[in-house]
Image (cartoon, rainbow, N blue to C red):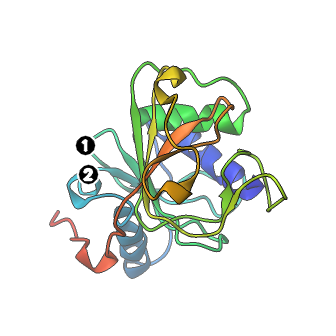
Amino acid sequence: MKKRITLLFGIILFVGSVYAQSPTGDSSDKQAKINSAMSAAPYAIAKNATIRDWPASEGEEMALLREGTNEYTCLPDMPGTPGNDPMCLDEPWLTWADAWMNQKEVNISKMGFGYMLQGGTPESNTDPYAEGPTDDNEWITDAVPHLMIIVPNNSMLEGLPVTPESGGPWVMWRNTPYVHVMAPMPKYNPSDVQEDSD
């Protein structure tokens, strides 16, 4: 979890910046990362999203792989994590990520959507900062492809299921400032990802 927090910090630092580090590696590696990032969300969203790469180490810039035209930012599978966890996040979710990383209150004014249609990494259903399973933190080991939803008023989530056992959407990290809805979705087949023609 600490590694994820460190790497996600790059999203906030570099999304919307007026400059970007040139992507490294050959064109096939770049395209592989773009394809991975695009596999996080439906093609209708991913095709126009900004795509960035994870920094190789803390403090490095997050390379721009492709400029986008919608409000989503997609990232490829995160290096060093046990699952396949590319993600596409809209602007409210980027604000949420900043709050989560810095352990402060979430301040959003509209609903936010984040896609992780390849699944993710094991994590706690109750503790936003858990680094492993405990007797009471409801550790989730299954990589469930999902849509994540945040709302500006958390009272809107009252009465919804709070565990994945229901088989449908559930509220994750309840009773914390980082509460959100996890909505299971079909896994997106990376072979269906279409390359941009431009």
Badge 2 element: helix
Q: Compare residues 160 and 95 and report the one nearer the observer.
A: 160
Residue shown at 66%/23% (left/top)? 105
Badge 1 element: loop
Residue 28 in view in this figure: yes
Quadrant for the N terminus in the image? bottom right
Residue 17 in view in this figure: no
Mark 1 touches mark 2? (CB < 8 Å): no
Quadrant for the C terminus in the image? bottom left
Residue shown at 51%/32% (left/top)? 159
Residue 150, which numbered label? Answer: none
Mark 2 nearby-residue class (10 Å; few <14, some 14–19, many ≥20): some
Q: Earlier in the sequence, mark 1 or mark 2?
A: 2
Three-letter code for the amino acid on which mark 2 is drawn: Ile
Residue shown at 49%/20% (left/top)? 153
Looking at the picture, does residue 155 appear above or below residue 121?
above
Relative horizontal placement of residue 9, taking residue 42 as reference (left or right): right
Considering every residue shown, the one lying at the far left of the view is: 197
Q: Position of residue 24 (x, y in %)?
A: 50, 68
Q: Compare residues 188 and 72 and report the one nearer the observer.
A: 188
Residue shown at 64%/69% (left/top)? 141
Q: Position of residue 9 (x, y in %)?
A: 64, 44
Residue 69, which numbered label? Answer: 1
Looking at the picture, does residue 59 appear above or below residue 108?
below
Q: Compare residues 60 and 135 and report the one nearer the observer.
A: 135
Q: Which residue is mark 2?
A: 45
Q: Position of residue 35 (x, y in %)?
A: 35, 71
Three-letter code for the amino acid on which mark 1 is drawn: Thr
